[in-house]
Amino acid sequence: MNFALDAIRGLKACWRLVCLDEDGLDDLDLSADGFWNSFAALILVAPLYLYSSSAGARLASPPQPERSWFSAFALLALLWVLWPWIMITVSRLLDRRQHYVRYIVAYNWSSVFVIAALVPVFMLQQAGIIGVGVGAILSLCVIIWSLYYRWYVAKVALDVPAITASMLVAGDLAMSIVASAVV
């Protein structure tokens, strides 16, 4: 399969998950190729992440120092491999090894929606259509939605209780914060 077809399939599946349709998992390619191809979602995520990272720093009140593009991409690349690597052990501890591939494929493709959700807020703010206060409120809403979406993906893809999915999202968030401080 080529990247475009993989992307369409993965994004369609994760759009169904955005709509809280857990049967969207059935649309994922869970083969070995589908697993590795899901990491190519980075091609879609990277430009959105680099823009959001830069715009978020500039639009913060007070403005924050911007990461270089290299540093921002290095952080993204680290996060892109670190969470799936951590989840190898976690899925074993949770006795969910059989759902690891499904979770990672869903997680990778869902990352496109997670990062894309912030872009319109930053664009509206940069264009002067919304102010800092409204931008902050909308950003907070997007972050809350993103955490919920990550929770939902973990819950249905790993077939775990709500509290376990919550702990996974907290772990993912903590890992991201620590990695961001280090890189």
Image (cartoon, rainbow, N blue to C red):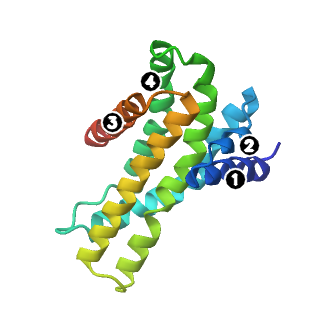
Q: Is residue 179 left or right of residue 11?
A: left
Mark 3–mark 1 CB contact (< 8 Å): no
Return the x and y of residue 15 as percentages of the image width and height: 62, 54
Indicate the amino acid at tag 1.
Lys
Q: Is 142 placed left or right of 113 in the picture?
A: left
Q: Which residue is mark 2?
A: 27
- The three-letter code of the residue at mark 3 reads Ala
Q: Quadrant of the N terminus?
A: top right
Distance from the alpha carbon under mark 4 to that under mark 3: 13 Å
Tag 4 near tag 1, CB within 8 Å: no
- Above or below — where is 152 with respect to 135? above
Lower position in the chain sequence, tag 4 or tag 1: 1
* Of 121 and 165, the residue lying toward us: 165
**Earlier-in-chain disc, 3 versus 1:** 1
* Camera-side residue of 18 and 132: 18
- Quadrant containing the C terminus is top left
List the residue tagged with mark 4. Answer: 86
Q: Is there CB contact under 8 Å for labels 1 and 2?
A: yes
Residue that carries the numbered disc 3 in the rendered image:
170
Residue located 33% across and 82% down the image: 130
Residue that label 1 marks: 12
